[in-house]
Each structure stands twice: as structure tokens, then as C-alpha cells.
Image (spheres, grey):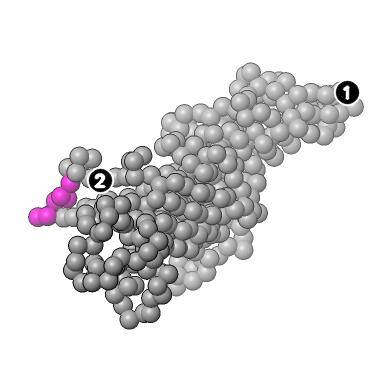
Amino acid sequence: MDRLRCGAFPKERPSDVLRGIGISSWLHGAGFTGTGENRIMGTVRVGLSEDGRPVVYAASAEMGQGEQTAFRRILADALGIEAEAVTVAEPNTDVVPDSGPTVASRTTMIVGSLLVDAAKEMIERLKMRLKESGEGDCRYERGVFRGDRGEIRFADAARRFHDIVVEKQYHHPPFIQFDDVHYKGDAYPVFAWGAAVAELKVDPVTFETRVTRYTTTQDVGKAINPDQVVAQIQGGTLQGIGYALYEKVQLKNGRFDITGFTDYIIPTVTETPVFDVKIWENPYPYGPFGAKGLGELPFVGAAPAVVSALWMIFERPFTKIPVLPEDLARLFSNEESMERC
């Protein structure tokens, strides 16, 4: 760094690089801000097919985030059956209710909570119909209705009473209040949290910058699908790294200066760092099995961690803040400071 400061050629060896470590901690609200969710009043419907399979009717669009898998797992767990037995209808607005848009880190938490409520009502209505048909009082455990006259599997009961349809509409828990006039109160029903450490290297001649390792822990409430959660965190983080280092859009004469992916640079697999992802589960009692929103959380903390690492390299050594020799040593791939000019 001393050589760089003095204007000398900043490398003694081709392998010499500057290294930085940055940290960030952040939060992100789940669902629409303020009274947004109460205005949307998202609705979900659960029906039964003639062959006894529960069917999810929701307007939420699958965009690669694994929503259909999440819906299947949530409803299946709530009903005590296998996820493979659940069908998710095409989100065609001719046949599905308005569940609200697939934005605002809301789909799993908001729509998923409605699926849990719908499953509970579906079980109760099936128990009622079984009783009316002469089966007597039944209790329901792990996909089986058990009564005085024996056991009936969920699929068999659903085939008999496939005309049952349950709809649920979302409203915030009563203790979540927001004043749209004075902007006071609970902006979100719950927040998800994250912390990260970004490690990067910079070539002091070309200034090529690459994030080499990214360590993060993120609070998702409850991981409905742990593998999917890790993938979401990795993908959102990589998008945040792109926002910090690669993507640039400007206006020229009222037009954007990019024409497509040929000149709009996004990170690819070659720019992907080594990820160390840990899931923290701090359940939210009004989410499905405790799940919170995750969609945007990974993106939020990535750029601050990267910028923090760059600040360590390029800003801190030039300020009046005392810099310890071991701090300078860590900036280089070799463990010695570059020769002073």
C-alpha cells in the first residue's frame, strides 16, 4: 500500500494483490409496508380433486424462487400427507383468487400462512362430513381419520367429499397497527435479519476486483425447504455483488445507455465466491410453521459488505486513522507489507 500511495509500481510479484474484509448487518421487512397487506386482502383457495388430491389455487407466480415447492410442502405438512400428493393449479386469473403480487418478500409468509389456515378448516369440514355420513366422531392424525368405525385415509375421505372448497383471506394480526396519515406504527408484521462477511481481492495494477468468499447467517424464521433457502441466499447475494461491482446503468439524452445483456454486466458463475451459508431459525408465530419472508433479504446486505471491504483497502490506509502493521500485512496475498518507497 505504501508503494501505491507513493505512485510506484505497486507490485513486486505478479501474484501480489490487495485484500480486504468487510462486514454488514441488516434487516428487511416481510410483506407490504404499513396497511398494504390489509388493503390487498390476499386470498387463497384449497379444493379437492376427484381422485382425492388437495389443490392449491393462488395467483402467486413462479419465477424460479421455488414457490410451488414451498406451497406443496406447507399444505402437505399442515394436512399430514406427502408433498407429492398436493397439486398447485396454474396461476390463471380466470380460475384462481387474487393472492396479491409475488413481491415484497411476502409469498411464503403471507400466502403460506393462509394455506395452513385452509388446511385446518379442510380437516374440520371433512370430519364433519364423515360424522354426517355415519362414521361418528373422528380425530385426525398424520393423514388418517380415526373413529369408532375404523380408519379412513385423507385421500379416501377427500375422494368421497371432493366438493369441499375452502377459501382464506389474509389480515394482519390485530396487534399490528399502522397509521397511514402520520406514518407511525408497525411498518411490517415482522423483520428478517442477516449478517455477512465479504472477503475480496483487488489487483493493484488492473484494479480487477473479485469477491473470493462470502460468509453469512440469515434469519428466515423457519426454513420450509432448507436447500431452497440456501440457494435463494446464494442467488440474492450474487445479485447484490453485481449491484456493488459490475452493474451500471446511466441516462444519456433521456435514454438508458445499455441495450441488453451485451453491455449490462451481471455476475456469472466465474464471479461467484465461495459461499458459507448458515440458516438461523427464529420462528414468527404468524408465519407458516414460523417462516418469515426471505426473497429480498440476501440482496440487501451484500453490497454494504463488499463496499466495506473496499473501504478497508482504499480509504482507511489514506485517512488519519492509525493503521497497525498487521492490518497492512493482511491486505496482500503474501504476509509481508510491500516495500516502502
- Within 10 Å of disc 2 (Cα), the crowding (few <14, some 14-19, many 20+) is some
**Where does residue 152 sit, x and y in percent of width and height?**
79, 23
* SS assignment at label 2: loop
Which residue is depicted at the point 54% across and 54% down? 217
Residue with the mark numbered 2: 265
Q: Residue furthest left?
A: 253
Q: CA distance from mark 1 to mark 2?
A: 66 Å
- Find residue 229 and report its horizontal and vertical position in percent: 53, 43
Q: Nearer the viewer, residue 306 or 41?
A: 306
Element at label 1: loop
Identity, as a three-letter code, of the amino acid under mark 2:
Ile
Residue 35 seen in this snapshot: no
As drawn, 90 above or below 266: above
Disc ID at residue 149: 1
Outermost residue toward the top? Answer: 51
Residue visible at 62% across and 30% down in the picture: 83
Inspect the image, locate mark 1, and give the three-letter code of the amino acid beneath it: Arg
Which quarter of the figure has residue 45?
Answer: top right
- 262 displayed left or right of 216: left
Residue sitting nearer the eye, 32 or 233: 233
Which segment is the magenta one? 252-258
Which residue extends farthest right?
Answer: 148
Q: Does 315 sit left or right of 230 as displayed?
A: left
Give residue 63's position: percent from left, percent from top: 41, 37
Left/right of residue 285 with respect to residue 103 in the rendered view: right
Residue depicted at x 56% and y 50%:
278
Q: Position of residue 66 (x, y in %)?
A: 49, 37
